[in-house]
Structures are given as structure tokens and as C-alpha cells.
Image (cartoon, rainbow, N blue to C red):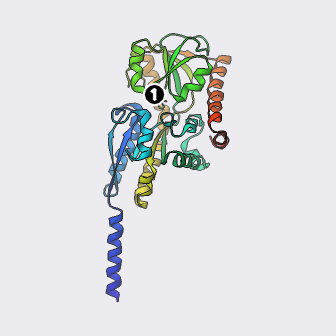
Amino acid sequence: MKKTLALTAAFAMLAGSAAAEEVTLKAASAFATGTTFARPFAAFVDWVNENGKGVLQINVVGGPEAVPPFELGNAVSSGVVDLANNTAAFYTNLLPEGDALKLATNTIQEQRENGCYDIIDEMHQSAMNVKYLARTGDNVNFHLYLTKPIEKPDLNGLTIRTTPVYQAMFKALGANLVRTAPGEVYTALERGAIDGYGWPIQGVLDLGWDEQTKYRVDPGFYQVDVNVIVNLDTWNGLGDEQKALLEKAAAWIEAKNADNLDINAKEAAAQAEAGIEVIEFSGADREAWLNAAQDEGWAAIAEINAEAVDKLKACF
Ligand code: 173
């Protein structure tokens, strides 16, 4: 009897370990390998591969050359890839109100505390069949970069490269808008097809855009969200140990968002070194600029989903 129990227990253990066999997830990034917004994700992947031996590994198949940025939401939603490094602005086709993530004024750590994370995770799960695993980009603002100067928060007569992030704000300020993936910005500048572009404080030099950029408009506005999202069927198929590993990796990479303040200062210095001049709005112009960002940003979300505005405003 004792022997049978021991055998049964041994068998159960074996079966348990078989269920938790090492799994390899296929990943892609919306941002080019080696550039600013791919870096935290690369660190996340390295951490998982280092700490997840025998449990879970991540194989990054590539960046925008592997899956076009505006298609990556579909790829992770359908399971073509298991995991993605992507910004909500690139998957508004699946989760239009996801564009609200840029409107957060607190950190992901605070959003986990106050329940906001759960609301956003639920939105991702129900609208696009993905688990919202981690958010990077806290403390990083967006800016307008230009090839010609402006005096006021008035973009009439300018053609500006946009994504959903900047769309409502720049449109309200009078710009003509051209939506492109990051990979098309350099050529558009070179050809004179655009007079400027929206982009965060980080990454301009990485992409070589400084060569074609004369001005940055300050202050910055909104807050970057670059998220790790996981196909929900993949997520649900993982064992507890595998989920715990990914959640630990998420907390680890999110803690590094604090480094962004330093990185921002270095990027601003490098932009100045590269000859990018700052157009700094002050007083009423500054207020008009920031109000356009905030008011137009929320108004655009309200048109999509008024209920989401109420929920998110309360915890952002
Ligand atoms: O400008 C963009 O392409 C964009 O929307 C974005 C979002 C997050 C990080 C970097 C760029």
C-alpha cells in the first residue's frame, strides 16, 4: 500500500514536471532592434532567458522588418507571435481606446496599486485577446520636431508626420497630418514631404533623424507607453511557474522606468550637440500647447468610448 502511494506520488510529480516543460515563446518588436524603445524589451527578454532556463524562453524573431508595426497588434492577437513589444498607438485598429494610455500622469507601479492596471488588462483581453503584461516608457514625454521654426502653438500650413498619439492635438492646432510608421520618417524628411514629426524625447539620434531636424518644441506632452503584450491563448496555456516568471520579469523591467529621467537628460544634451534648437513655449503659449494636448487627447477617447474615459481618468 505504502509502495503504491509512493509510486503514485512519483508519477504525479513526473506528470507535473512534464506539464511545466520548458516552452519557447516567439516574440517581435514594433521598434527596430538596438533602438531606444526596443532596449527595455531586449533587457526583459535577456532577463527571462537567464532566469527562465528549463521554464520558459523567448525567441525574438525581429523588429519592424519581421512584422510591420501597425500589423503587430494583429499578429499577437491571432497568435502569429506569442509576445510583442508594442505601443498602444500602433494597435488602435483593435483597441481604439488604448490610445488613452499616453494620457497617464502616474507610473505603472501606481496603476498596479490603484486598480488601473486591471482595467487596462481587461480592455486588452476582451478587445484583442492579449494579456497586458508590462508597461515601459514612464517618465518619457512626446515632442514636436520641425525643419522650420514656429512662434506660437499654431501648426497651420505645416505637414506633420503623426501616429494616433499626436493626431487629435496636432489637428486641433491646424496641421496637415500624414500617418507613418517610424521607418518612413527619415525619407519623408529627406524628400521634404513633411515639415516635422511627433516623437518622444528619446531616440531621435538613434534613428539618424537629427540630420534632418532643426527644432524641437518644448514642453513635451503625454507619456510614452511601450508595452509587453502576450497572446491570451498562449498566456492561458502557461503553467503557474511560467506565468510567475513573466510577471517577475514585468516588475523588473517596469522598475527600470525610473532610469528614464537620466536618459531623457542625456538625449536632450545629445540633441543640442547635434544642432537641434529648442523652441520653448512659455506663459499663455505653454498653457495653450499643453491644454491642446490634454483636452484634445481626452476628447478623442471620449468619442470612442466615454465609459473608458471615466474609468481611466479616475486612475491616471
Ligand atoms: O511616434 C510614434 O511612432 C509613436 O507613436 C511612438 C509611441 C511610443 C514610442 C515611440 C513612438
Q: Position of residue 263 (x, y in %)?
A: 45, 31
Q: In which quarter of the image is residue 61?
A: top left
Q: In which quarter of the image is residue 52?
A: bottom left
SS at circle 1: loop
Q: In which quarter of the image is residue 302?
A: top right
Q: Which residue is drawn at 37% across and 40% down?
A: 28
Side of 217 where 11 appears, left or right: left
**Residue 274 in sight in this render:** no
Q: Which residue is drawn at 66% across and 42% down?
A: 307
Q: Foreground residue, 15 or 215? A: 15
Looking at the image, how many numbered discs can be counted on the residues? 1
Side of 120 where 52 appears, left or right: left
Q: Where is residue 20 in the image (x, y as percent from the top left)?
A: 36, 62
Mark 1: give few (<14), some (14-19) or many (20+) Cα within 10 Å: many
Q: Which residue type carries mark 1? A: Gln
Q: Residue at x 45, y 25 (%)?
A: 180
Q: Is 296 located above or below residue 278 in the figure?
A: below
Q: Is 2 located above or below residue 69 in the figure?
A: below
Q: Foreground residue, 263 or 298? A: 298
Q: Where is residue 79 in the image (x, y as percent from the top left)?
A: 40, 47
Q: Foreground residue, 254 or 87? A: 87
Q: Foreground residue, 307 or 210? A: 307
Residue denoted by label 1: 202
